[in-house]
Image (cartoon, grey):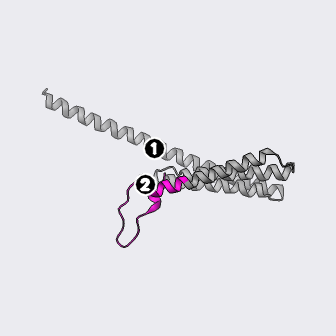
């Protein structure tokens, strides 16, 4: 067997292994996304049914539904673009902290340093969103060629 033939065989084996590896990774990727999306939808339906069973809905409950909505949107965006929308994670964190703040104030009725700490955390997360938005518009990770007669897509480079 000549060396050229051995090199061709090695190249074909490498391409086949790479294709199989890509198939395995992408299969896991889509399976995991479907599982996370289904679990998020199931959890939101169960939370909603729990609210109906309770007979009344509080602001805490509504914010919990917003958290599920943001998680579902994040899965959908990740499914379509293969980019993790960092802003949505920060939105979820802000909503969760707001829910905690409202719950703490409405149930305990005592203003303490915990309220200040949670408010400060919300402010820091809001500033983080500002930084991420500025950085993604100023330094996009993916360059999209501008369309004729339109401005370049500012959101395309956001991670």
Check residue 56 in the rendering and tell me which mark sits there, or answer none. Answer: none
* Dot placed on the residue nearer the N-terminal end, 2 or 1: 1
Classify 10 Å Cα crowding around label 2: few (below 14), some (14-19), many (20 and above).
Answer: some
On the image, the x and y values in percent for residue 37 come to 58, 50
Circle nearer the viewer, 2 or 1: 2
On the image, the x and y values in percent for residue 85 come to 53, 52
Front in this rendered view, residue 5 or 79: 79
Q: Quadrant of the N terminus?
A: top left
On the image, the x and y values in percent for residue 118 come to 73, 47
Apparent side of residue 31 relative to residue 122 in the rendered image (left or right)? left
Asked if one can make out residue 71 in the rendered structure from this viewpoint, the answer is no
Check residue 27 in the rendering and tell me which mark sits there, or answer none. Answer: 1
For label 2, the residue is: 140
Distance from Cα at disc 2 to Cα at disc 1: 28 Å
Asked if one can make out residue 87 in the rendered structure from this viewpoint, the answer is yes
Residue 148 in the magenta stretch? The answer is yes
Q: Measuring 68% from the left and 47% from the top, which residue is drawn there? A: 121
Q: Is residue 24 above or below residue 65?
A: above
Q: Residue furthest left?
A: 2
User: Tag 1, which secondary structure?
Assistant: helix
On the image, the x and y values in percent for residue 89 come to 59, 49
Magenta residue span: 131-159
Front in this rendered view, residue 149 or 26: 149
Q: Residue furthest bottom?
A: 149
Residue 151 in the magenta stretch? The answer is yes
Apparent side of residue 23 relative to residue 111 in the rendered image (left or right)? left
Q: Measuring 19% from the left and 34% from the top, which residue is drawn there? A: 8
């Amino acid at each position: 067997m000549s060396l050229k033939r051995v090199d061709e065989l090695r190249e074909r084996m490498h391409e086949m292994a790479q294709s199989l590896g890509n198939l395995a990774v992408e299969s896991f990727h889509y399976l995991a996304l479907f599982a996370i999306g289904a679990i998020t939808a199931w959890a939101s339906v169960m939370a909603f049914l729990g609210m109906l069973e309770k007979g009344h809905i509080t602001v805490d409950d509504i914010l919990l539904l917003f958290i599920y909505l943001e998680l579902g949107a994040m899965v959908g965006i990740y499914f379509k673009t293969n980019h993790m929308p960092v802003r949505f994670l920060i939105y979820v964190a802000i909503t969760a902290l707001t829910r905690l703040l409202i719950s703490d104030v409405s149930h305990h009725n005592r203003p303490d340093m915990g309220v200040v700490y949670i408010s400060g955390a919300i402010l820091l997360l809001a500033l983080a969103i500002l930084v991420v938005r500025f950085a993604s518009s100023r330094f996009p990770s993916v360059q999209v060629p501008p369309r004729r007669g339109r401005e370049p897509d500012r959101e395309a480079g956001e991670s």
